[in-house]
Image (spheres, rainbow, N blue to C red):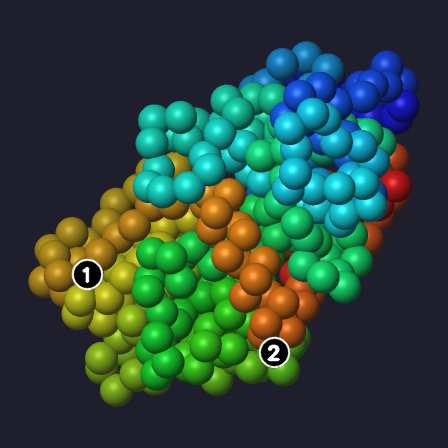
């Protein structure tokens, strides 16, 4: 079978199309899935470019959607022909985070073989059902980015109608957060460095937009738009380069979901101002399998569909990552066999 693997020490020029043995039939508790699609995340890029080192010949990609071809003994949750989508932490069935999900040792495409393969055989708990009627490309956007937005706003939030949500940028997490927030009756303020992209997020329902190049201290704009109150929830994907402004934008008693490290891994923060706001800063990495199942149910009920920027062939993964690095995309970049 074909698989897309990474040679060490990493880098886009070390991504290879490999011929590997077929994984065979599923054993007890396992399912065999024909993978049809994946989607790119910042985490996948960190693995591919060598920033997050992994094993030699690692099959890439954490997200995978496809069709169940066979089920092993003892599996009654799935049947051949079911459309399924992978989970980011196969070892996190439900409940609160624990030591086993404080790193990526069990994550496909990082500590374990990933989803950029024509076929995989995994424990049934490594997948959930995909939303009914979705394409494989659409389903492949759920595992990492969209589920992270769900946890940030709904599981950890908890978001309620009438709240104000601030999103940063126009990547997969932020777009999903805008869609979720609007569906749940919240007001959304969105930021970007591109006026064109800001017009597109307004079409998705964002109520107010801020160009952070025009307003480098964008917290002042947030406070102006909220009459000095600040926002209830911030989906913080930037990290140290944006966290200070987020801390100055949050409402007293509000919530910041710290998700990304797009601007680095450490930096200064206005601790006194944040303490005075008595706000909550919650770090998170994706969510549990049960959270994903709840999210799939919500997607089926609300009719939300993901925003897909471009779809590449799996064999074009290096080109897809280059497109991701360019920052020109709006929403998710997908792969298909």
- Residue 318 showing in the rendered view: no
**Residue bearing the label numbered 1:** 279
Instruction: Name the residue located 40 percent from the left edge and 69 percent from the top edge.
Output: 166
Instruction: Name the residue located 84 percent from the left edge and 32 percent from the top edge.
Output: 118
**Relative to 12, does residue 299 appear above or below in the rendering?**
below
Label number found at residue 12: none
**Relative to 53, does residue 182 appear above or below in the rendering?**
below
Instruction: Name the residue located 66 percent from the left edge and 49 percent from the top edge.
Output: 129
Label 1: which secondary element = loop
Instruction: Name the residue located 30 percent from the left edge and 73 percent from the top edge.
Output: 231
**Quadrant of the drawing holding the N terminus:** top right
Q: Position of residue 261 (x, y in %)?
A: 44, 43
Q: Quadrant of residue 81?
A: top right
Label 2: which secondary element = helix
Residue 289 lies left or right of residue 230; in this view the side is right
- Mark sitting earlier along the chain (2/1): 2
């Amino acid at each position: 079978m074909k698989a897309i693997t990474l040679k060490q020490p990493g880098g886009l020029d070390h991504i290879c199309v490999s011929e590997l043995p077929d994984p065979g039939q599923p054993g007890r508790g396992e399912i065999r899935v024909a993978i049809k699609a994946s989607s790119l995340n910042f985490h996948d890029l960190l693995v591919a470019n060598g920033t997050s080192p992994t094993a030699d010949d690692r099959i890439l990609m954490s997200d995978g959607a496809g069709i169940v071809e066979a089920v092993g003994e003892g599996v009654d949750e799935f049947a051949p022909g079911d459309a399924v989508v992978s989970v980011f932490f196969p070892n996190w069935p439900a409940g609160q985070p624990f030591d086993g999900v404080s790193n990526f040792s069990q994550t496909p495409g990082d500590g374990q073989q990933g989803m950029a393969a024509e076929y995989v055989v995994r424990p049934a708990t490594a997948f959930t059902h995909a939303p009914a009627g979705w394409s494989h490309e659409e389903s492949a956007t759920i595992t990492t980015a969209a589920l992270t937005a769900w946890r940030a706003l709904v599981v950890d939030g908890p978001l309620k109608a009438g709240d104000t949500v601030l999103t940063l940028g126009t990547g997969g997490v932020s777009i999903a957060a805008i869609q979720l927030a609007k569906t749940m009756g919240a007001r959304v303020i969105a930021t970007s460095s591109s006026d064109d992209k800001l017009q597109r997020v307004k079409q998705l329902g964002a109520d107010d937009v801020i160009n952070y190049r025009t307003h480098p201290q964008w917290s002042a704009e947030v406070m102006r738009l909220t009459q000095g109150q600040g926002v209830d929830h911030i989906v913080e994907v930037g990290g140290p380069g944006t966290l200070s402004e987020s801390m100055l934008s949050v409402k007293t008693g509000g919530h910041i979901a710290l998700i990304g490290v797009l601007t680095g891994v450490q930096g200064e923060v206005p601790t006194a101002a944040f303490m005075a706001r008595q706000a909550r800063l919650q770090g998170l990495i994706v969510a549990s399998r049960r959270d994903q199942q709840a999210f799939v149910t919500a997607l089926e009920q609300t009719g939300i569909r993901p925003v897909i920027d471009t779809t590449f062939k799996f064999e074009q993964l290096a080109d897809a990552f280059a497109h991701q690095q360019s920052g020109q995309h709006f929403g998710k970049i997908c792969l298909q066999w």
